[in-house]
Amino acid sequence: MKIMLNGEAREVRAGTLSELLEECGFSGRVATAVNEDFVPSSLRIAHKLADGDRVEVVAPMQGG
C-alpha cells in the first residue's frame, strides 16, 4: 500500500502501525501519529493502516 511517512511517499507491506515501524527500521522510543492523530505505543499493534494514510514518526533527541 502507499502511505506518506514523514512527508515522503512510501510503498509498504505493513498492515499495522507496529509492523510499519519494524519494516522501516524504527527502534527505541518514538512518538507516532496517523492522519494527525496521536497513536500511543500501546495501541500501535492494533492500529490498522489504510492506503493514503499520513504517518509521522518522531524520535526524541538529546542536547541543548
Image (tube, rainbow, N blue to C red):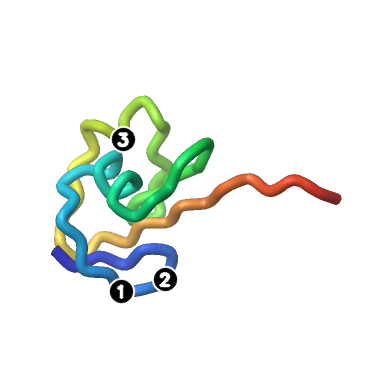
From the top left corner, tell me how far across and down residue 15 is, in percent: 15, 47
- What residue sits 36% from the left and 63% below the top? 5
Instruction: Give the residue pinned by disc 2.
Output: 7
Circle number at residue 9: 1
- What residue sits 29% from the left and 39% below the top? 18
Return the residue nearer the eye: 64 or 53.
Answer: 64
Amino acid beneath label 2: Gly
Q: Residues within 10 Å of mark 1 (few under 14, many from 20)?
A: few
Q: Quadrant of the N terminus?
A: bottom left
Q: CA distance from mark 2 to mark 1?
A: 7 Å
53 displayed left or right of 57: left
Does the CB distance between marks 3 and 1 fall below 8 Å?
no
Quarter of the view holding residue 44:
top left
Instruction: Give the residue pinned by disc 3.
Output: 44
**Callout 3: SS:** loop
Q: Earlier in the sequence, mark 2 or mark 3?
A: 2
Amino acid beneath label 3: Arg
Quarter of the view holding residue 35:
bottom left
Q: Residues within 10 Å of mark 2 (few under 14, many from 20)?
A: few
Which residue is outermost to the bottom?
Answer: 9
- What residue sits 43% from the left and 42% below the top? 38
- What residue sits 21% from the left and 32% below the top? 46
